[in-house]
Image: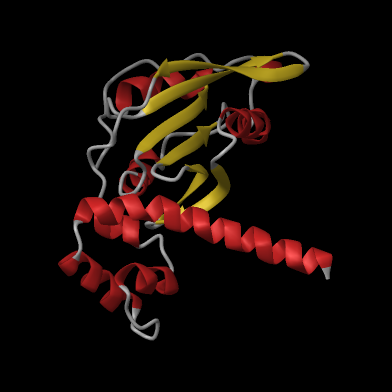
Amino acid sequence: MAVKRRKIARGPRPPAKEQLSDGAIRAALVPSLKTRNPTCVLLEEFSGAGARIDLLLISSSRLTGYEIKSDLDSLQRVDQQLAAFSRYCDNLCFVAGRHLALRLLNGLPSWCGVIVAIGRRESEPDFLTLRYPRQNPMIDVSGSLSLLRRSELARLGRRDTRCRKRQLTNHLLEHYNPLELRRSIPSALMQRQKLRAAELQTLDGG
């Protein structure tokens, strides 16, 4: 789905000393999300559906994506990113420096959230929500299933793990309720991270 293009003025670029990089925004955003969502799993640079999202917050029932656009970025890839992220994110929010925030607010679909990061000299940026995200109406069950590994798909469909991923996906789409499938994906991703954490802990202990 293409971002609506409107002829709006580009936000003024902040002075160089106030410009926020991706790293500066991320360094403040990550701990903030972890503090506010202690029971969730937060993944950085998550790849899925043909694109990589900066942050994916996983709860037992929802996937919330956060894409960062710093004062040094452009919006050239927003169309492609939106098309990919909307396939599986229940909620999607763009976090931008003030140079791009208003353009995103006016150009993104109304269900996408927009947060502006405001630089402060010698301190972490402040975050101001310009629009809260709403339920994504574009979720694609097939695209969401593509996030899962073959073993995870086989477990959901109670099938042989030797089946190909496409076969497993088609079986699930043909024989299971789409809403139930969609609800099972966040918990499957969360379980994957718990298993990975347990494996790392075992290795560290050894």
Residue occupying the point 43% across, 39% down: 64
Q: Position of residue 73 (x, y in %)?
A: 53, 34
Q: Is residue 172 above or below residue 115?
A: below
Give left or right: position of 8 versus 19.
left
Residue farthest toward the front in the current orientation of the protein: 158
**In the rendered image, which quarter is residue 38 located in?**
top right
Residue occupying the point 75% across, 67% down: 202
Residue occupying the point 37% across, 15% down: 9
Residue occupying the point 39% across, 57% down: 50
What colour-coding does the image apply?
secondary structure
**In the rendered image, which quarter is residue 21 located in?**
top right
Q: What is the quadrant of the C terminus in the image?
A: bottom right
**Pick the front one: 197 or 85:** 197
Q: Position of residue 130 (x, y in %)?
A: 42, 15
Q: What is the quadrant of the N terminus in the image?
A: top left
Q: Is residue 188 above or below residue 53?
A: below
Residue farthest toward the right in the current orientation of the protein: 206
Q: Is residue 177 above or below residue 161?
A: above
Give left or right: position of 189 versus 28.
left
Q: How many marks?
A: 0
**Pick the front one: 112 or 176:** 176
Q: Position of residue 136 (x, y in %)?
A: 28, 36
Residue farthest toward the bottom in the current orientation of the protein: 162
Q: Position of residue 41 (x, y in %)?
A: 56, 45
